[in-house]
Amino acid sequence: MVTLTPEQKKLIAANPCLAQVSAKVQQNIIESIYVKSIHKGQFLHRRGDQAIGYYGVVSGRLRVSAHNPEGKALTLTFMQGGDWFGEISLVDGVPRTHDCEALDSCEIIVIPKTSFEQYLLQDVTSLRHITQHICQRLRLVFNLVEQMTIQSLHERLARRVLALTKTDGNILNINQQELAQMMGVSRQSVSKILLAWAHADWIKLEYNHLCIQQPDQLMALCITDPVP
């Protein structure tokens, strides 16, 4: 049985699936938990891997990505401290559909597949929270498809940057190549837009960082539909 640190206990308490189960069930889950440490460049899982657990990020940052037939990487999202993920393959039994790579040293809580199935999928309230989480991810996919279909690159980039500020604040720990991968376009295309925004003092470009100075100006670019 792992002895949980204060940070790990906080992560578990913040997960609605785990917080609402009985003390006995929560203790059974905690007794099954193990902690996984991975270094920058290591993969938590690869596309096609069988799901072995439900992941909670204690610290660090991971990139979830896919590759097109030409091998070009597309960054779908980032996972960082406080995030839980990996439930979809545990629910439907399908192997992992994306790569998940550590961008720096990461500490991950793992709830094994057997515990997830026995204690969370069998609990009605927990299952409802899991379903809601999956629905949120599905809505995100629909929004991304819509953006790629009808929105200009300027608007798509503004939306993505504003979405990142909801978790990271106005200073984004991301470089232009990562942004380009998230958008599925060339770094040069993203760089051209970012430089224009920087010249207008909407943002400030720093090494591997992006500082949002005038978020209202980026919001104004989102003309198709206001950012929620």
Image: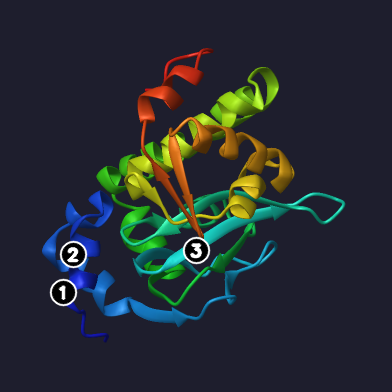
* Residue under the image location 55 percent in, 59 percent down: 63
Foreground residue, 167 or 6?
167
Report the side of 90 relative to 179 (left or right): left
Q: Secondary structure at mark 2?
A: helix
In the image, residue 217 above or below residue 180: above
Task: Tell me which amino acid carries mark 1.
Answer: Pro
Q: Which residue is mark 2?
A: 10
Residue 172, given in percent of the width and then of the height, sits at 42, 50
Crowdedness near tag 3: few (<14), some (14–19) or many (≥20) residues, C-alpha within 10 Å: many
Residue 195, given in percent of the width and then of the height, sits at 58, 39
- The image quarter in which residue 96 lies: bottom right
Q: Which mark is residue 6?
A: 1
Mark closer to the observer (3, 1): 3
Crowdedness near tag 1: few (<14), some (14–19) or many (≥20) residues, C-alpha within 10 Å: few
Mark closer to the observer (3, 2): 3
* Residue under the image location 32 percent in, 77 percent down: 32
Crowdedness near tag 2: few (<14), some (14–19) or many (≥20) residues, C-alpha within 10 Å: few
Foreground residue, 70 or 129?
70
Q: Are marks 2 and 1 in contact (CB under 8 Å)?
A: yes
Residue 145, given in percent of the width and then of the height, sits at 64, 28
Q: Which mark is residue 62?
A: 3
Task: Tell me which amino acid carries mark 3.
Answer: Leu
Q: Secondary structure at mark 1?
A: helix
Foreground residue, 8 or 135?
8
How far apart marks 3 and 1 lie (CA) works out to 22 Å
